[in-house]
Image: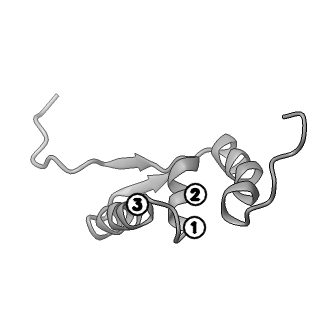
Amino acid sequence: MPARSSTKPRAALIDSSAYHALLDEDDENHATATAIVQGLLAARTRVFTTNFLVAESHALLPWGIWGVPWPAGS
């Protein structure tokens, strides 16, 4: 296999913690996550996620961003 001419990643997985940090301006990692994603996009790095991570984010975001109390017994 030939050596790659660049060290930039070809693709990056965006997980549920990244979605949370990107969407919640009060999250301690918001600025870092935003800078990382902007850098990936500027470098034309392909970003992707999975159906599972979308579902996980959908399930977890209300409790983190909107301050909805976690369900009793969980």
Front-most of residues 58 and 43: 58
Q: Which residue is mark 3?
A: 33
Front-most of residues 33 and 67: 67
| Residue 18 screen position, x and y as percent | 50, 53
52 lies above or below 22: above
Colouring of the image: one colour
Residue at 67%, 57% (x, y): give it: 64
Q: Mark 1: few, some, or many residues within 10 Å (few <14, many ≥20)?
A: some
Q: Which residue is mark 1?
A: 23
Identify the image quadrant of the N terminus: top left
Instruction: Choose the circle earlier in sequence order: 3 or 2.
Output: 2
Residue at 29%, 70% (x, y): give it: 42
| Residue 71 screen position, x and y as percent | 87, 45
Residue 20's label in the rendered image is 2
Residue at 73%, 66% (x, y): give it: 66
Question: Mark 1 is on which residue type?
Answer: Leu
In the picture, measured across the screen, residue 24 lies left or right of residue 41, that is right
Q: Mark 3: few, some, or many residues within 10 Å (few <14, many ≥20)?
A: many
